[in-house]
C-alpha cells in the first residue's frame, strides 16, 4: 500500500529508509523511526484488535505507554512475543504482527456475538455464573475461561535471547526526558553530579517534540536536542533511551528495563535483548510527565476515537494524519493545539468544546486560522462499527445534565481531550501519600517519602515556564548538596501560549432512549454501567470496585481510565474524589518481560554449580551425576548398560567385599582455632569434648535451641588448639553461620576463630575390608595398622610428596578411612588411589551406593535429620551428655520429647523380601482402615541391602522402641502400593559395629 | 531492596545479608536453672512489632559479621546499625 495518510514536511522519521512489514499477513511499508502504530495509521489501518470481553472492534487510542487497545502478537527472528503495544513497538525491516483476541480474523470475529449478548455479561459475570454446578468447573468452565482470557499467546519455545542485569549507583536519577527532566539533568550535570537520565521512548524530549513553544530563541525540540547532545558528551552523565524506570523500591532503589534490541530485526551478537538496571540513587527526580485522559461518551471505543495528544503526536513525530475529517472533542485548550496542527497541514477540523465561552491565546489562534469551533457542544456517540463514520453531537446545558437536539456530523476520527493526569506512579511507589489537586482534577504527589521530588507535569505543573524554572533549580540544589559545586545556569527565556481553565466535565450523559456503551476502561471493557452495577451490589471500597469490575487492570493498568472511574464512583456515592481515594500504584509501571527479570539466571546459570577437583575424572569414567545442593556428585559410575540399581548395587557390594573409594569433597569443613576451641565444641555438640586427645576424631551431634537435631559429623583435634570440623553437605553454610552467631553474639568471651575450608580440601573415603592394605601401600612410611591408626584416629601422611590428612572414620560401616589433600592435589590423590588400589579390586562408588551402605548400617543422614527429629528419634540419645549444658539441651525436657511412645528410628523389611518400599510411604497398622488412616510413621530412606540381598528401609516410627518384630503396612498412595512389612532393628548389618574397629 | 550500613564494610545491598531475628533476645546463661516459661520466651515467643525494631543481620556475603540493625518494620527505614558487641543506647 502507499501510505496514503502520510504527509510531507512533517515528522521526525527517516524517509530515506523505507521498511516493509506484515500485519495480519498483509505487507505494508513504513519508515525508519515509525512505530508499528504510526506505520499502520500511515496506511489507513485503524482496526487492530478486538476487545477483551465483547470482542468489539478496536483501533489505536494513544501513541505510547498508555495504549489500552493496540496489543499485538509480535513475530521477530523466529520468536513470538505476546502483549506488545503497537504504539511502543518500533518498526524494523521484516516485522510481523498479528491481532489478538479474535477468531477467525480481526475483520470477522465470532466472539463479537458477546457484544449482542452483553446484557448477559455484566460486571462480576464470571463470579456469578461459573459457580454451579461444581462438577462443571474442571470440564467446562475452566477450559472456557482459559480460552477466553488473555490477550496473546506466550511462546512455548526456549527463549534464545539473552538478558542482562546491571547494578548502578548515581547521585541523581531522573525519570523522563521532557522539559523538567532535561532542565534538572543539565543543571545537576553542570555541578559535576553523577546523573542518569532515562527516557522510555526512542526519542528524548517528551512533550517538547510536539508542543509549539520556544526556549531560548529555539523551538522546544531544537533546545531539547542541544541539551541531550551536550549531556551525552559529559563523562558524569548517562543518558538512556528506550529505558523505562518501572519500579521504585525501598531505600531509593529503582529498577529500569532497557530495551536494547527490540527495535532491531535481530539482536546483535554479544548484545542482550533487554537489560535490567538496579539503580541506587542518592536523589530521584521524577519527571514522568502526564497522560491525557479521555471524555466518556457513547461508543467511545470505536476505532478512530483517540486521544487528541496522540493525534498530534502522530502528526508531528510521524507525519501521519489519523483522519482527513477530524472532530476534536475537548474540555480544555489542548484539543485546540491538535486542531491547529491539523489546520496547518491542510485539514479542516471541527472543534467541540464543552465550555461555554473559553478565551485564551491558543483559542484565539485557532479562531484566527478559521477553525470551526462549537462551544457548549459534546459528542453524544460515535457512529460506525469498524471505523468512525460520523458522530452524534449535541449542545449541552451549563449544568451538563441536558442535551440539546442530536445532530449527526460526518467525521473519520474523533480526537478527545479530557485534560491531563499527572503520572504519579513512581512517586506513589516510593511511599509518597498523594493528594488531590482540585484545579486539575487529579492526584499529585504529596510530602516526599524517600529522597524523591516530582517535577513539571507529573507534579501537576502545566506551564513550561514554571516547569523549567523549578527543574533547573531542583537539579542545581540537589547536586550542590552532593558535589558542593555551584555553577550558575541562566534559565532560558520561554515563549508559550497561555491556556484557560479546563472544564470539570468528564462524561456525556446518555440521550433519552439510547443505551450506548460508554467505556471507562477500554482494555477490559468496563463501561459506566458496570461500575453502577458494582456500586448497586454494595461494593464501596475503590479496591473492591476495581477487582469486581476489573477497572484499571491488565497490561495498561488503567492509565487512561482510573481517574474517570474515580469520578464516576464519587459522583454516584456523592463523595468528593479524594474521599474515594485511588487504588494502590504497584510496580511495574509497564509490563516487563519475564526474561528481563530473570536475567542470566536461566538453565545451568539458575544456580551456581560446585564441582569437586576430581570432577573431570568422574566425567571420564562414566559417572552419572546427581545434584546435591549446588554440588554435582557422581551417583554411580555406569558400566556398559547398567542402570542405577544395578550399578549402585555392584559398587556397594564391592565395598563390602573389597574396597571402594568415594569423593567426599562436598562435606562441609570448618577450621576451628583458638584456646577456647574445645569449650566451643563442648557447648555446640551434645556430647563431651573437653577430653578429646590430639590426633583423635569424635562423632558429634548438634542441636538447635529448640532441641531438634541440626547436623552431625566428625571433628578431629589436629593439635592443641586446632580442630577440623566436618558437616553434612547440605548444612555446611548453616553450621558456619550458627557457630559465628554464638561466637560473635552469645559467647564473645570465647577466644576462637572459625573459617570454612570446604573448598581447600579434597576428600576421598576409602572403605572396605581391604582398605587398610590399600592405605599402607599409599603411605608406606606411615604406620596405619590397627594399633598405629585405631578407629577414630588421625594422622598426617606423605602421599608421594603431598601432605595428606588421614582420618579413620566410617560412614559405610566398613573398615574405612578418609584422606584429605589440598584441593589442587585432589585429582593426583584420586588417581594414585585408583592406581594403587587396582590389585585390591578397587571401584569408585557414588552417592547411591553410599546411601545403601549407610542405610543398612542404620547410620542417619539428612532424610532422618529432617528438622523434625531429636537425638532420641535417631537412636543418638547415648551421645547426649547428662553432665554438661549445650545448645538446645533445655528443650529436650519438653514433655513431648520425653514421652514414653516417642517416635524412633527402626528398620523395615517387606515380608515378601522382594518389594522395595517407596521413600515417604506411611506406616499403618491396618491397610483397610477408613481414611484418614492413622499414620504411625514414615519411611525415611530405602535401599537394596547388598548384605542380605533384599529391600531394606529406615523409618521414623511412633513408639519405635517397642515395635521391633511388629507387622505393619507401608502405604504409598502416590505409587499405589500397599506393602506388608516387618519392623526390625535399624542396625541391619553388623549391629555391634565390629567391622569399623577391625 | 534495603540498603544496610554494615559497621565493618559500609553501605551494602540487602542481598548480601541474611536476617537473624530479634536482637533483644538474650540467651539464658549456660548451666542455669530456667523455667519452662523463660525458655519458651527465649526459643519461641517473639513480639512481631510494628515500628522500630532492633534486629540481627549477618553480612553473609561480605565480612560474615553479625550486626544489629535498628529498622522500622512498617516503613523499612533503617535508623542505626551496630557491631555485634556494641551497646545500643
Image (cartoon, coloured by chain):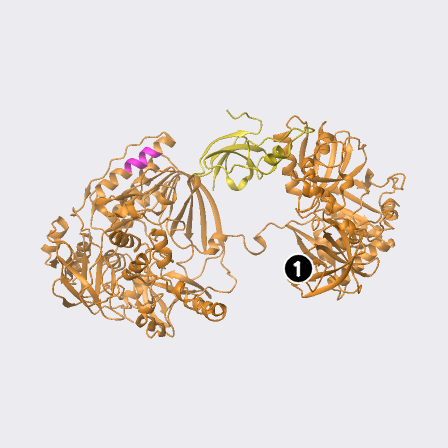
Does residue B36 appear to the left or right of A686 in the view shown? left
Does residue A605 appear to the left or right of A896 in the view shown? left
Q: Look at the image and tell me whether residue A106 can be seen.
A: no
Q: Inspect the magenta stretch and tell me whether residue A474 lies in it.
A: yes
- Chain A colour is orange
Q: Nearer the viewer, residue A439 or A220?
A: A439
- At mark 1, the secondary structure is loop
- Chain B colour is yellow
Q: Nearer the viewer, residue A343 or A669?
A: A669
For the N terminus of chain A, the quadrant is: bottom left
**Which secondary structure is most common in the magenta stretch?**
helix
Does residue A165 appear to the left or right of A213 in the view shown? right
Q: Specify the segment rendered in magenta.
A: A472-478
> How many numbered marks, from 0 up?
1
Q: Look at the image and tell me whether residue A466 can be seen.
A: yes
Q: Nearer the viewer, residue A131 or A46?
A: A131
Residue occupying the far front of the picture: A930
Residue A952 spot, x, y in % from top left: 78, 58
Residue A380 spot, x, y in % from top left: 19, 63
Q: Inspect the magenta stretch and tell me whether residue A453 lies in it.
A: no
Q: Residue at x 26, y 65 (%)?
A: A517
Q: Residues within 10 Å of mark 1 (few under 14, many from 20)?
A: some
Q: Circle 1 marks a residue in which chain?
A: A
Q: Is residue A335 above or below residue A28?
A: above
Residue A54 spot, x, y in % from top left: 33, 68
Q: Residue at x 73, y 33 (%)?
A: A682
The image quarter containing residue A971 is bottom right
What residue is pinned by disc 1?
A933
Q: Nearer the viewer, residue A293 or B21?
A: B21
Q: Is residue A15 above or below residue A453?
A: below
Amino acid at each position: 500500500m502507499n501510505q496514503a495518510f502520510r504527509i510531507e514536511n512533517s515528522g521526525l522519521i527517516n524517509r530515506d529508509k523505507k521498511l516493509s512489514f506484515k500485519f495480519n499477513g498483509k505487507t505494508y511499508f513504513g519508515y525508519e523511526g515509525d512505530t508499528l502504530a504510526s506505520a499502520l495509521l500511515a496506511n489507513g489501518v485503524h482496526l487492530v484488535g478486538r476487545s477483551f470481553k465483547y470482542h468489539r472492534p478496536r483501533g489505536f487510542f494513544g501513541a505510547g505507554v498508555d495504549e489500552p487497545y493496540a496489543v499485538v502478537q509480535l513475530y521477530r527472528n523466529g520468536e513470538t512475543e505476546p502483549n506488545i503495544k503497537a504504539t511502543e513497538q518500533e518498526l524494523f525491516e521484516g516485522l510481523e504482527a498479528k491481532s489478538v483476541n479474535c477468531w477467525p480474523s480481526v475483520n470477522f470475529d465470532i466472539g463479537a456475538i458477546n457484544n449482542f449478548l452483553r446484557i448477559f455479561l455484566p460486571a462480576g459475570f464470571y463470579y456469578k455464573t461459573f459457580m454451579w454446578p461444581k462438577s462443571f468447573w474442571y470440564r467446562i468452565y475452566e477450559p472456557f475461561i482459559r480460552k477466553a482470557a488473555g490477550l496473546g499467546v506466550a511462546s512455548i519455545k526456549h527463549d534464545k535471547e539473552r538478558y542482562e542485569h546491571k547494578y548502578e549507583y548515581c547521585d541523581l536519577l531522573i525519570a523522563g526526558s521532557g522539559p523538567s527532566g532535561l532542565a534538572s539533568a543539565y543543571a545537576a550535570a553542570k555541578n559535576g553530579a553523577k546523573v542518569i537520565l532515562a527516557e522510555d521512548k526512542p526519542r528524548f524530549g517528551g512533550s517538547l517534540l510536539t508542543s509549539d513553544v520556544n526556549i531560548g530563541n529555539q523551538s522546544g525540540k531544537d533546545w531539547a536536542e542541544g541539551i541531550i547532545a551536550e549531556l551525552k558528551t559529559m563523562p558524569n552523565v548517562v543518558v538512556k533511551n528506550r529505558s523505562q524506570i518501572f519500579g521504585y523500591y525501598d531505600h531509593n532503589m529503582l529498577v529500569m528495563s532497557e530495551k536494547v534490541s527490540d527495535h532491531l530485526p535481530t539482536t546483535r551478537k554479544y548484545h542482550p535483548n533487554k537489560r535490567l538496571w538496579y539503580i541506587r540513587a542518592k536523589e530521584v527526580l521524577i519527571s514522568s510527565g502526564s497522560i491525557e485522559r479521555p471524555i466518556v461518551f457513547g461508543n467511545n471505543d470505536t476505532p478512530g476515537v483517540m486521544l487528541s495528544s496522540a493525534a498530534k503526536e502522530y502528526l508531528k513525530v510521524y507525519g501521519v494524519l489519523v483522519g482527513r475529517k477530524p472532530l476534536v472533542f475537548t474540555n480544555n485548550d489542548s484539543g485546540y493545539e491538535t486542531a491547529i496542527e491539523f489546520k496547518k497541514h491542510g485539514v479542516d477540523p471541527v472543534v467541540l468544546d464543552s465550555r461555554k465561552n473559553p478565551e485564551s491565546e491558543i483559542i484565539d489562534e485557532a479562531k484566527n486560522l478559521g477553525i470551526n469551533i462549537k462551544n457548549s457542544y459534546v459528542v453524544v456517540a460515535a457512529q460506525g462499527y469498524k471505523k468512525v463514520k460520523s458522530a452524534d453531537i449535541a449542545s449541552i446545558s451549563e449544568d451538563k445534565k441536558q442535551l440539546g437536539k442530536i445532530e449527526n456530523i460526518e467525521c473519520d476520527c474523533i480526537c478527545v481531550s479530557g485534560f491531563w493526569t499527572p503520572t504519579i506512579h513512581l512517586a506513589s511507589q516510593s511511599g509518597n501519600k498523594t493528594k488531590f489537586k482540585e484545579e486539575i482534577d487529579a492526584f499529585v504527589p504529596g510530602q516526599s517519602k524517600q529522597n524523591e521530588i516530582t517535577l513539571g507535569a507529573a507534579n501537576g505543573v502545566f506551564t513550561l515556564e514554571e516547569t523549567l524554572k523549578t527543574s533547573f533549580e531542583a537539579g542545581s540544589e540537589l547536586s550542590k548538596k552532593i558535589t558542593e559545586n555551584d555553577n550558575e545556569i541562566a534559565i532560558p527565556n520561554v515563549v508559550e501560549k497561555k491556556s484557560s481553565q479546563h472544564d470539570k466535565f468528564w462524561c456525556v450523559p446518555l440521550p433519552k432512549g439510547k443505551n450506548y456503551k460508554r467505556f471507562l476502561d477500554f482494555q477490559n471493557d468496563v463501561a459506566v454501567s458496570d461500575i453502577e452495577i458494582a456500586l448497586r451490589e454494595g461494593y464501596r471500597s475503590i479496591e473492591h470496585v476495581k477487582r469486581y469490575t476489573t477497572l484499571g487492570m491488565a497490561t495498561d493498568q488503567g492509565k487512561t481510565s482510573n481517574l474517570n472511574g474515580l469520578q464516576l464512583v464519587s459522583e454516584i456515592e456523592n463523595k468528593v474524589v479524594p474521599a474515594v481515594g485511588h487504588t494502590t500504584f504497584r510496580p511495574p509501571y509497564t509490563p516487563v518481560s519475564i526474561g528481563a527479570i530473570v536475567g542470566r539466571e536461566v538453565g545451568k546459570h539458575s544456580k551456581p554449580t560446585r564441582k569437586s577437583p576430581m570432577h573431570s575424572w568422574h566425567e571420564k569414567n562414566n559417572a552419572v551425576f546427581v545434584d546435591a545442593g549446588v554440588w554435582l556428585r557422581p551417583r554411580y559410575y555406569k558400566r556398559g548398560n547398567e542402570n542405577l540399581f544395578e550399578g549402585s548395587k555392584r559398587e556397594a557390594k564391592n565395598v563390602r567385599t573389597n574396597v571402594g573409594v568415594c569423593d567426599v569433597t562436598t562435606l562441609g569443613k570448618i577450621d576451628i582455632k583458638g584456646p577456647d576451641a574445645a569449650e566451643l565444641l563442648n557447648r555446640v555438640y551434645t556430647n563431651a569434648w573437653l577430653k578429646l586427645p590430639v590426633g583423635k576424631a569424635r562423632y558429634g551431634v548438634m542441636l538447635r535451641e529448640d532441641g531438634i537435631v541440626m547436623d552431625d559429623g566428625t571433628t578431629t583435634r589436629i593439635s592443641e588448639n586446632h580442630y577440623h570440623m566436618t558437616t553434612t553437605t547440605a548444612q555446611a553454610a548453616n553450621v558456619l553461620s550458627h557457630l559465628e552467631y554464638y561466637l560473635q553474639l552469645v559467647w564473645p568471651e570465647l577466644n576462637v576463630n572459625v573459617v570454612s575450608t570446604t573448598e581447600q580440601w579434597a576428600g576421598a573415603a576409602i572403605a572396605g575390608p581391604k582398605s587398610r592394605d590399600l592405605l599402607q601401600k599409599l603411605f608406606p612410611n606411615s604406620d596405619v595398622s590397627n594399633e598405629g591408626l585405631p578407629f577414630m584416629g588421625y594422622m598426617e601422611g606423605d602421599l608421594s610428596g603431598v601432605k595428606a590428612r588421614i582420618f579413620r572414620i566410617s560412614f559405610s560401616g566398613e573398615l574405612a578411612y578418609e584422606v584429605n589433600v589440598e584441593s589442587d592435589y585432589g585429582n593426583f590423590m584420586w588417581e594414585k588411589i585408583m592406581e594403587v588400589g587396582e590389585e585390591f579390586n578397587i571401584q569408585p562408588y557414588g552417592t547411591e551406593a553410599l546411601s545403601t551402605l549407610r542405610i543398612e548400617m542404620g547410620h542417619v543422614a539428612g532424610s532422618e535429620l529432617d528438622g523434625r527429629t531429636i537425638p532420641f528419634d535417631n537412636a543418638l540419645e547415648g551421645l547426649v551428655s547428662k553432665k554438661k549444658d549445650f545448645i538446645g539441651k533445655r528443650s529436650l525436657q519438653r514433655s513431648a520429647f520425653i514421652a514414653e511412645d516417642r517416635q524412633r528410628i527402626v528398620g523395615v523389611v517387606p515380608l515378601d523380601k522382594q518389594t522395595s518400599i517407596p521413600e515417604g510411604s506411611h506406616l499403618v497398622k491396618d491397610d483397610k482402615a477408613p481414611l484418614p488412616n492413622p499414620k504411625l510413621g514414615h519411611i525415611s530412606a530405602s535401599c537394596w541391602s547388598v548384605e542380605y540381598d533384599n529391600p531394606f528401609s529406615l523409618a521414623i516410627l511412633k513408639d519405635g522402641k517397642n515395635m521391633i518384630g511388629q507387622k505393619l503396612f507401608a502405604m504409598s498412595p502416590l505409587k499405589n502400593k500397599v506393602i506388608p512389612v516387618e519392623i526390625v532393628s535399624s542396625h541391619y548389618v553388623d549391629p555391634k559395629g565390629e567391622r569399623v574397629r577391625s | 531492596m534495603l540498603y544496610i550500613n554494615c559497621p565493618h564494610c559500609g553501605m551494602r545491598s540487602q542481598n548480601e545479608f541474611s536476617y537473624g531475628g530479634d536482637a533483644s533476645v538474650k540467651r539464658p546463661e549456660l548451666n542455669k536453672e530456667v523455667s519452662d516459661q523463660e525458655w519458651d520466651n527465649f526459643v519461641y515467643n517473639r513480639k512481631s512489632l510494628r515500628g522500630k525494631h532492633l534486629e540481627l543481620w549477618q553480612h553473609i556475603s561480605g565480612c560474615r559479621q553479625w550486626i544489629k540493625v535498628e529498622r522500622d518494620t512498617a516503613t523499612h527505614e533503617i535508623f542505626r546499625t551496630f557491631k555485634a558487641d556494641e551497646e545500643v543506647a
